[in-house]
Image (cartoon, grey):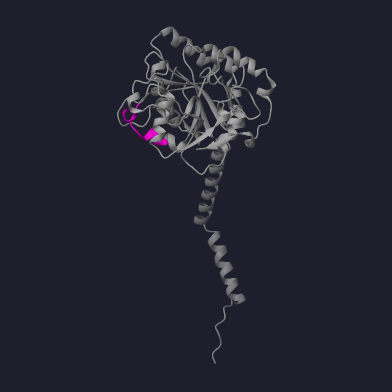
Amino acid sequence: MPSSPKVFSSSAAAASRRSSLRRLLSSPAVSAACLLFGLTGFLAAAVSLSRGPAEAPRGRCPDSSHPLSVSVAWDRRPGDAAGGATEFPAGHATGSRGRHKVMAFVGIFTGFGSVGRRRALRRTWLPSDRQGLLRLEEATGLAFRFVIGKSNDKSKMTALEREVEEYDDFVLLDLEEEYSRLPYKTLAFFKAAYALFDSDFYVKADDDIYLRPDRLSLLLAKERPHPQTYIGCMKKGPVFTDPKLKWYEPQSFLLGSEYFLHAYGPIYALSADVVASLVALRNNSFRMFNNEDVTIGSWMLAMNVNHENTHALCEPECTASSIAVWDIPKCSGLCHPEVKMLELHRRKECTGGPTEAAETETDDE
């Protein structure tokens, strides 16, 4: 029976191969090749050292090196989803065109006659400097900016530019700032907010409410089975048909005698899926009613949204669970907000108390 072949090497053969290898290594061609290889490695190392260490990857912390304020152009072309960002004034646009990731973006609606209100907010629950805003964002996952349009009055625009320069906490919309055009401003806000921020929720708030950002953060962070959610203090009521009344609705014939369920205007939140649907539509596709809260409520009726009724967003007094405090139903915000805001902030029940999700009373409709 033949045996399996074996692989082996005799000592004589090994000696012969070692001799051949020595002759090969001692040849001039091989010596030159080794020298060239060594020089190449030396040069590569020198270039690497001269460039310094590789740049570390960017973290998720808010970047404090770029201005926070930004101006966003209003969508004037039919079919466009959102306006593009532009610099206003020079050097006051965000440092990156990418969408900034936060849990929620809160736009505080304000006007040219509301300098005192903004001052009161910055002295109470809203930080008055860039680092404070970034710390609040890091602690709560909420980014806050004042939202305002433009004016043909040059003195007003000059004053606004100075305020932007000092506080750096604005989103400036390219449309006329008029109360009668508030529904248009609201649509522009949601489109601009979606273009600038990658958020789970987008919150519209007025500049005359006392807010607890920590509790708002916990409310928005709750797990929800509905991706399309509309959060607010919900209401119904009679449709006003008298032109002499503040809340008069010229299109009342479309609404009947009573309004559908919708959130009070001082503060409400829309989930990202809802805002994405708004962004996808042309501006002239939306019906605009006279009142902003009714307008938003009508849009929500056209979508498969979940109405989440949260009474903590419309408390008349500070409580252990209040998120937003305003003088409901006497005023659509705080009455005399410049004074009342400071008074509330001095009260222990407004600034202290628990910060727990369980403390928030929320009813789903």
Does 54 sit above or below residue 268?
below
Percent coordinates x, y for residue 241 in the rendering: 37, 19
Percent coordinates x, y for residue 218 in the rendering: 60, 34
Q: Residue at x 58, y 67 (%)?
A: 19
Percent coordinates x, y for residue 333 in the rendering: 53, 19
Does 335 sit above or below residue 282?
above
Q: Residue at x 54, y 46 (%)?
A: 39
Q: Is residue 283 magenta?
A: yes
Magenta part of the protein: which range?
Answer: 276-287
Does 245 sit above or below residue 211?
above
Task: Please identify the residue farthest to the bottom as the structure is shown.
Answer: 1
Q: Is residue 177 visible?
A: no
- Which quadrant of the figure has residue 320? top right
Task: Please identify the residue farthest to the front as the structure is shown.
Answer: 257
The one nearer the camera, 73 or 209, is: 209
Does 2 sit above or below residue 73?
below
The one nearer the camera, 126 or 316, is: 316
Using residue 174 as the reference point, say whether residue 47 is left or right of it. right
Using residue 314 as the reference point, say whether residue 189 is left or right of it. left
Percent coordinates x, y for residue 226 in the rendering: 49, 42
- Which quadrant of the figure has residue 21? bottom right
Query: How many numbered marks are there?
Result: 0
Q: Residue at x 36, y 32 (%)?
A: 81
- Which quadrant of the figure has residue 194? top left
